[in-house]
Image: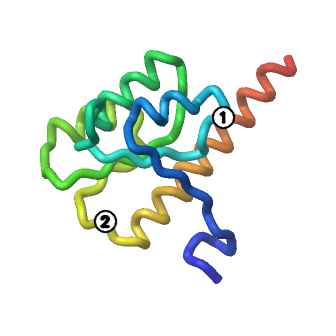
Amino acid sequence: MSPCDGFEPTSRSFPSAHAFLDVLRFGVPACLIVDVQMPVMRGIELLGELLNRDFSIPNIVITANDDKAIAARAFSLGAAAFFLKPVSQSALIAAINSAKAKSYFVRQLSAEAELQ
């Protein structure tokens, strides 16, 4: 059995935050992993932009810098987890599974609200 409870996760990487934002009109992922240090638009800025656009995507933030202010900002923008590099595989998989479960729950509530 895989470390992801019997399924192989699908993933997609993007060269930039802007490239990711461009494809959101085609679907929203169950979980987003961002690095604080990304080219052009930093990971924290991406999380803020997602909120500005009314997207609620469970996210995980990773960084090489142990900066408490950045961690606090990430959590204030809805980060489900914040990790310093290197991240252990088991910790990352647990965070992904938790974020995906939250995403499923939020989508179920949204669907029920639309039916009423």
Q: Is residue 101 above or below residue 103?
A: below
SS class of the residue under badge 2? loop
- Please state, as top left, top right, bottom left or bottom right, where the N terminus lies in the image: bottom right
Q: Nearer the viewer, residue 80 or 57?
A: 57
Residue at 23%, 41% (x, y): give it.
71
Tag nearer the camera, 2 or 1: 1
Residue at 42%, 48% (x, y): give it.
33
SS class of the residue under badge 1? loop
Q: Is residue 17 above or below residue 5?
A: above
Q: Indicate left or right for 84 with 43 as reference.
A: left
Residue that lies at the very extreme toward the right in this rendered image: 115
Residue that numbered label 2 is attached to: 87
Of the numbered discs 2 and 1, the one sitting upstream in the chain is 1
Circle 1: residue type: Gly
Q: Nearer the viewer, residue 7 or 110?
A: 7
Quarter holding residue 68: top left
Quarter holding residue 116: top right
Q: Indicate left or right for 48 with 27 as reference.
A: left
Q: Position of residue 88 (x, y in %)?
A: 34, 71
Q: Is residue 100 above or below residue 4?
A: above
Q: Indicate left or right for 34 with 70 as reference.
A: right
Residue at 66%, 34% (x, y): give it.
27
Residue that numbered label 1 is attached to: 27
Circle 2: residue type: Val
Q: Position of residue 113 (x, y in %)?
A: 77, 21
Give neighbour class at mark 1: few <14, some 14-19, many 20+ (Cα, 10 Å).
few
Q: Indicate left or right for 41 with 101 as reference.
A: left
- The span from disc 2 to disc 1 (Cα, nearest Å) is 27 Å
